[in-house]
Amino acid sequence: AQSVTQPDARVTVSEGASLQLRCKYSYSGTPYLFWYVQYPRQGLQLLLKYYSGDPVVQGVNGFEAEFSKSNSSFHLRKASVHWSDSAVYFCVLRNTGNYKYVFGAGTRLKVIA
Amino acid sequence: GPKVLQIPSHQIIDMGQMVTLNCDPVSNHLYFYWYKQILGQQMEFLVNFYNGKVMEKSKLFKDQFSVERPDGSYFTLKIQPTALEDSAVYFCASSYRVNQDTQYFGPGTRLLVL
C-alpha cells in the first residue's frame, strides 16, 4: 500500500533562516511526487512536482525538493524563509497506475521575526 | 493560476438530511476529484470522475454518496442521507489530463452534521 509520512506536524523557524520539511513515502515503484501549500481559507497550491529525471526539482517562490529513491524521501527546502511562507505544507504521492493522490498529514510552518 | 471554486464554504445540517456540495472546476479541465479531510486527520481520496462516469472510488465513498456534472456545470457531491461521521472538509480538485497531470484544488467546504 502507498503512504506518505510527514514526521513533523509543526515547524517554527526564524525569518531568513533555511528550511527543510521532511517527507517519506512508501511505494514499490517510482511515484509521482508533489508538494502543495495551503494558506488560510485558500485551496492547495502546487509548489513543485517530480515525475522523473533530475532528482532536484525547482518550484515557485524559491522552494526546491530532492527526490531520493534509496531513502524513499522527497524533502522540501528553502534557503531563506519569509514570514509569508507561514502555511501548511502537504507532501503528496500519486502512483503511475491510478489517478488518486495520497496525502501526508501536513506540516504547519510558522515563520517568526 | 487556475482557480477552483467551491460553494458553499460552510454548511451545517441535521443528520439524515441531504446535502449537495458544489465545485466550479477550471474551465477546460476534464477530470474531477473529491477528497475528504476529517479534523486532525489526513486528506483522503473519495472519488474521481471523467466523461460523465466515476472512474475510481475509495471505501470512504459510501452508497449514500453520489457525484455528477450535469451539462458541464458544477461538479457536485451529494450525500443522502447524511450521518454524523460525514462532518469534514471536502475538497474538490480538477485536472486537464489524468496522466502526469497536476490537480488544482478548491478551498474546501466545511460540512458539519449535527
Image (cartoon, helix red, strand yellow):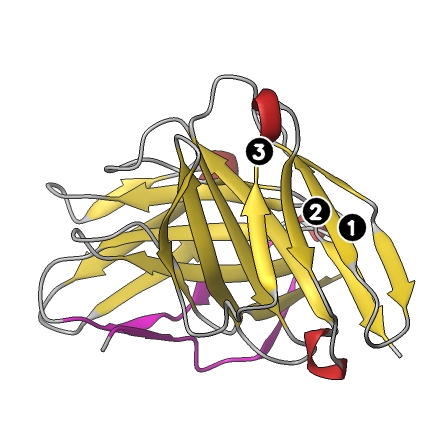
Which residue is found at the position 62% from the left and 61% from the top? A88
Residue B14: x percent and y percent?
90, 73
Within the image, what quadrant is residue A107 found in?
Answer: bottom right
Residue occupied by mark 2: B107
The answer to whether B6 appears left or right of B31 in the picture is: right
Using the image, tell me which numbered label, if any, was put on residue B32: none
Which chain does the residue under circle 2 lie in? B
Which residue is found at the position 81% from the left and 74% from the top? B16
Which chain does the residue under circle 3 lie in? B
Residue occupied by mark 1: A41
Residue that protrudes farthest toward the top in the picture: B28
Q: Is residue A83 visible?
A: yes
Residue B68: x percent and y percent?
56, 40
The magenta region covers A2-27
Residue occupied by mark 3: B69
Q: Earlier in the sequence, mark 2 or mark 3?
A: 3
